[in-house]
Structure formats: C-alpha cells, structure tokens
Amino acid sequence: MMDNVTVITMLTLSGLNGTANYRVTLFAVTVLCYCVILLVNVTIIATIIGDKSLHEPMYIFLCNLCINGLYGTAGFYPKFLHDLLSSTQVISHAGCLLQGFVLHSSACADASLLALMAYDRYVAICRPLMYHSVMTKQRISLFVFFAWIVPFYVLFLSTITSTSRLCGSNIPKIYCVNSLVNNLACSASIAANVIPGFNYTFYTGHALFVVWTYLYMVKTCLKSKEDMSRFMQTCLPHVFSVTMFTVCLLFDLLYMRLSSRDLSQNVQNFMAMEFLLIPPIINPLIYGYKLSKIRKRILHFICGKCF
C-alpha cells in the first residue's frame, strides 16, 4: 500500500509581499527600465553586426556580452511584470528551475565573456606583435562557443540536482534561485552542494585571471605614455564593467548567504534586482560612449536618419 504523498508542483515567490500599494508605479518603472535595456543592447548588437569594420575580437566579444544581457533579463522581466499585475505570485517547479537556469547561466556567461575581453586586451597591449596570430577567426569562434556552452553545461548539471521532491513551496525572493529551491527539498543531496561549489571555484578562477591581466597591463603600460593612452581608451570600459559586475554579484551573494531579517523588503528586492538592472543598462552605454568606433557609427546612423 502506497503512502499518501503530496507532490508540490507550484511554488510561491513571496518577494513582493507588502508592495500592493505601489505595484502600478513599480510596473511602470520596470517597463521603462526593460525598454531601455532592450534599446541600448539591440543598438550595440545591430551596430556591430551591421558594420564590417567592427568585426574585430573586442567588438565580437562585446556583441556577445550584449546578447547575454538580453538573454538574462528575458528570464526575469516578463515574469516579474506579470507578477506585479497578479494577485498571487506563483510559478511551477519546472518554470522555477528554468528561470534559475537562465539567470545563473547568464551570470556565468557574463564572467566568461569578461574574461575573454580581458584576455583580448592583454594580448593587444602586452603582446601586440602576436595579436593577429593569436586572435584568429577560428580561435575567436572557439572562445565564444566555450564562453556560452560551458556555463550552459555546468548550470544544467546544477539545475538537475534541484529536481528532488519538495517539502516546501515558499521562495522568499522575486525570482527563482537554485539554492533556494534546494532548501525546499525533502532530503539533502551531496551533488546539490558539490556542483555549486565547483561552479563557484571555477568562476572565481575567472575573476582572478581578470584581475591578474589588468594588473599586468597597468604595469606594462606605465612604461609608455602611448601604451597608457591606449589602455585608458580601450580598457577603461572593461575595468568599469568588471568592477560593476563584481560589486553587483557580491551584493547578491551577500544577500543570499547572510541573514536579511534586518533589511526592509524594498531593500531586499533592490539587492536582488540590481544584477539584472545595472549591468544590462550601463554596459552598452559605457562601451557605446567610450569606444570611438561604435560611438561614431551610432551617431552617423542617427544623423543620417534625422537629416
């Protein structure tokens, strides 16, 4: 005789509790932010794809960074906007795993692409004579392929460890995260701890590599004013993006790992959203403004349409 077991298939996202009085305002602001994200990222992507003079490693990596920005935000904003207009914020177990996969894989792909961009600048500045022999079309294609496929693979492994039977249904956040789903599992899984641990270690290695490349580049560029000028022109946006990515990620990890009882729900929601709000808007803007080739191409297009 089988035991009566309740199978939980729907989960509740409780991050919006207490926001009923200003959800319409929040909805309008969120729609505006999402439209800005779509506009600035699509503009950079279309500019790079449409101009053959921009088909260089640095711009190809930037194009993929913007595509990843669209991919990651697509896993959050449509569902969040729906929840703002809904009386209940629920999501299926399968849908929760899918959202967690998209958001986590997007963050990991960001780390991979930023590491590639750092490597590209390292070769260009520290090994200029080897640049064209190192950054070939075939090698760039391989780099981009692995920058996407590795996050997908490691996050797929992490996601399938979250498919255990659940004994709870409340997720205290505005979107799904694999670790919170694992906390609802009826039984602890070794794989659910080992695989995320490997992922953190693997991408911490990315971060250390990026820090090392920029420190080495600064050390090299201090010997020449010309090299320092080139560093400031092409590497400053990368340094800003890496810093912003790291700060947003650390805020999110601290929010996840540390107790948030002393924080208001609004502060918690902002800490949860900033990773999906600030980098996808600022990255295209800072690159579009600082990199002269992209800036000139966009201005030329706008002036051509207006006049």
Image (cartoon, rainbow, N blue to C red):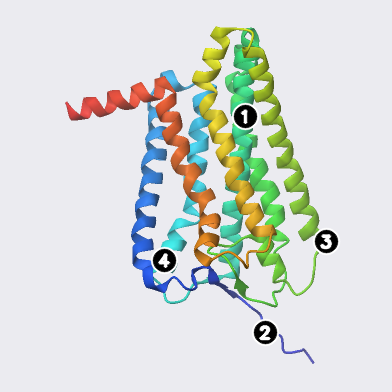
Task: For marks 1 and 3, give the CA distance.
Answer: 32 Å
Q: Is residue 152 left or right of residue 297?
A: right
Q: Is residue 138 above or below residue 277?
A: above
Quick one: SS at disc 2?
loop
Residue that label 4 marks: 82
Q: Which residue is depicted at the point 56% across and 13% down?
A: 228
Front residue of 220/163: it is: 220
Residue that label 1 marks: 116
Which is more foreground, mark 2 or mark 1?
Answer: 1
Determine the residue located farthest toward the right in the rendered image. Answer: 190
Q: Amino acid at mark 1?
A: Leu
Q: Amino acid at mark 3?
A: Ile
Q: Is residue 43 left or right of residue 303?
A: right
Q: Which residue is depicted at the point 64% across and 32% down?
A: 115
Determine the residue located farthest toward the left in the rendered image. Answer: 307
Task: For marks 1 and 4, give the CA distance.
Answer: 35 Å
Which is more foreground, mark 2 or mark 3?
Answer: 3
Residue that label 2 marks: 6
Quick one: SS at disc 4?
helix
Say if residue 96 shows up in the picture: yes
Quick one: SS at disc 1?
helix
Mark 2 / mark 1, whichever is N-terminal:
2
Q: Which residue is depicted at the point 59% across and 66% down?
A: 94
Residue that label 3 marks: 190
